[in-house]
Image (cartoon, rainbow, N blue to C red):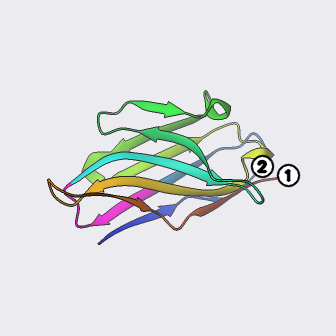
């Protein structure tokens, strides 16, 4: 069993910054891609950023230049540094990871989500 636990969400003023963290724990052979998604009220969940096991990254266009995804493989942790936050960034942010429990099995896991609210 694998768990993903996010932290770092909260209320921030426009133009402010937040850093989200997501720690994976449990039976982990290898963590492949990790990423952050978000879902605003009344909208579909969307990709924010993704980082592969070799460190290559991709971002949604609306986050390029403002958000930075990184990972610490030794700590089974992925981070999302969010700068220049805008009210439209308000959403529940969820961590996703593709985790192999053995050579033969890989599954997709989700965290419970953390609320980010950007408001003055």
Q: Identify the residue at horizontal 70%, vertical 36% (top origin).
A: 84
Q: Nearer the viewer, residue 107 or 14?
A: 107
- According to the picture, the residue beneath numbered tag 2 turns out to be 13
Residue 26: image x %, image y %?
27, 68
| Residue 29: image location, x then y, percent | 19, 56
What residue sits 63% from the left and 53% below the top? 45
Question: Regarding mark 2 in the picture, which secondary structure is present there?
Answer: loop
Question: Looking at the image, which residue is at 76% across and 42% down?
Answer: 86
Q: Is residue 98 magenta?
A: no
Q: Which mark is residue 7?
A: none
Label 2 Cα crowd, 10 Å radius (few <14 / some 14-19 / many 20+): some
Specify the farthest residue to the top. 65
- 2 and 1 marks in contact (CB < 8 Å): yes
Q: What secondary structure do most residues of the magenta stretch adopt?
A: strand
Count the labels in the image: 2
Magenta segment boundaries in residue numbering: 22-29
Q: Which residue is mark 1?
A: 120
**x and y percent of residue 95 in the render?**
49, 55
State how far apart marks 2 and 1 are (Cα).
5 Å
Residue neighbourhood size for the residue with mark 1, other residues' Cα within 10 Å, grouped as few (<14), some (14–19), many (≥20): few
Q: Give the residue at x 23% y 60%.
A: 28
Task: Say whether disc 2 or disc 1 marks the residue closer to the N-terminus.
Answer: 2
């Amino acid at each position: 069993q694998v768990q993903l636990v996010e932290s770092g969400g909260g209320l921030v003023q426009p133009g402010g910054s937040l850093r989200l963290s997501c720690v994976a724990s449990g039976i982990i052979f290898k963590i492949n891609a990790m990423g952050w998604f978000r879902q605003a009220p009344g909208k579909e969940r969307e990709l924010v950023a993704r980082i592969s096991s070799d460190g290559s990254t991709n971002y949604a266009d609306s986050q390029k230049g403002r958000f930075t995804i990184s990972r610490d493989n030794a700590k089974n942790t992925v981070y999302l540094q969010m700068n220049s936050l805008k009210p439209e960034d308000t959403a529940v942010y969820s961590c996703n990871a593709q985790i192999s429990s053995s050579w033969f099995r890989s599954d997709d896991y989700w965290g419970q989500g953390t609320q980010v609210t950007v408001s003055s």
